[in-house]
Amino acid sequence: MTKLPDTVRLEGGCLEIIDQTLLPGQIKILRLRTKEEIYYAIRQLKVRGAPAIGVAAAIGVYLAALDIKVNNFEDFYDRFLLAKIYLNSARPTAVNLSWALDRMEKCLLNNSENPVDEILNSLKNEALAIWTEDIEVCKKIGENGLQILEKNSGILTHCNAGQLAAVRYGTATAPIYRGHELGYNFKIFADETRPLLQGSRLTAFELDAAGIDVTLICDNMASAVMRQGKIQAVLTGCDRVAANGDTANKIGTSGVAILAKYYNIPFYICAPSSTIDLGSRSGADIKIEERDSLEVTEMWFHERMAPEGISVYNPAFDVTDAELISGIITEFGIVKAPYAQNLPAMIAG
Ligand code: MRU
């Protein structure tokens, strides 16, 4: 593993995060205290990746609760809800955000008979439990994912579902890190992932720093490397899995899945069960975030790379149809089609 600090953590009464907008050039730790600072850190992708924003929001709503200086439960709950709704509005697609915040609210309600300082203590413990579970769950995804991978395989990944997208191990990278420990000799291809370059800035950075053989490719090169026989499996993370197995992940993922099907390469999604949203019936129910046009027109070059005033469509995620997904690797095992039947069964245990 890369010797990076944990991506998110509660330390000294603050949310500590690595500012991912500065990577790979600079490793800078930010110490955030207010809900506004935490909201903007999520919104501006200083902390990003579905599991990481869930953990950040859980710690964030705990820190916000510390600032509610009332002793009466009803008033405390009202203000907690305002902070929860505010943090939940930072980004729409990754369900881990609302999952973690709902869990924090449930914890509060389970303690409604207790004095406010005891409720605060329970909220802190719940945020820390969400943090610890993320580490354990990703480790299990690593063990389960390794079962479908052969030694010496070429593996393509898209965006960053690595340690920078979770607390410590990542989801799609967890089998890669585990295989690396066991001498599997994987050769990883990382899509650069336009427009925000999470693949080159984050995935290539963290895998390279961990001593893993990683080759960066532009998004339009995936077909060529598949055709050359360099890819034996595709592993990506995801932001929300609908009940029928349709899966939202970083824009470009569905194209990679279509290519993988054409070249007969298995395409696996890696996801903690907290990313499965049985409330979304299919991909059509998943809200896709649209982001600022400047991410496409001028953010990454010294000169503008598009005409002034050009219309831009900048969806941050897309939906991969369930039929393109060979399996969903979770902490409980690998779920296969029919997803509408097997996902609820896996969640129910
Ligand atoms: O916009 P981002 O960088 O938050 O998008 C992240 C992704 O799409 C990841 O692949 C996804 O959240 C899974 S992270 C384990």
Image: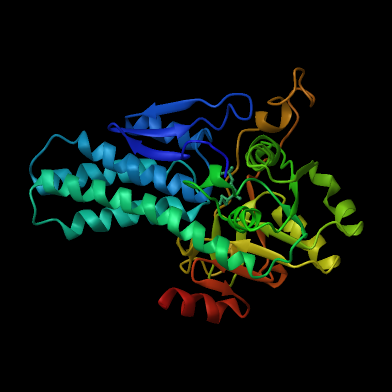
Q: Nearer the viewer, residue 45 or 204?
A: 204
Say which residue appears at 46% left-offset and 46% top-offset. 167
Name the image quarter holding the N terminus: top right
Colouring scheme, one of rainbow, by chain, secondary structure, one colour: rainbow
Q: Is residue 285 visible?
A: no
Say which residue appears at 56% left-offset and 64% top-offset. 143
Q: Nearer the viewer, residue 312 or 41?
A: 41
Percent of width and height locating residue 246: 62, 66
Residue furthest to the right in view is 228
Name the image quarter holding the C terminus: bottom left
Say which residue appears at 77% left-offset and 18% top-offset. 303
Q: Nearer the viewer, residue 17 or 65?
A: 17
Q: Is residue 74 above or below residue 9?
A: below
**Image quadrant where residue 274 sits:** bottom left
Left or right? Give the position of 236 relative to 165.
right
Say which residue appears at 79% left-offset and 45% top-offset. 219
Percent of width and height locating residue 340: 56, 78
Q: Is residue 164 above or below residue 94?
A: above
Percent of width and height locating residue 179: 64, 58
Left or right? Give the position of 319 relative to 10.
right
**Image quadrant where residue 335 sits:** bottom right
Percent of width and height locating residue 330: 53, 66
Residue furthest to the top in view is 302
Left or right? Give the position of 88 relative to 213.
left
Q: Is residue 73 visible?
A: yes
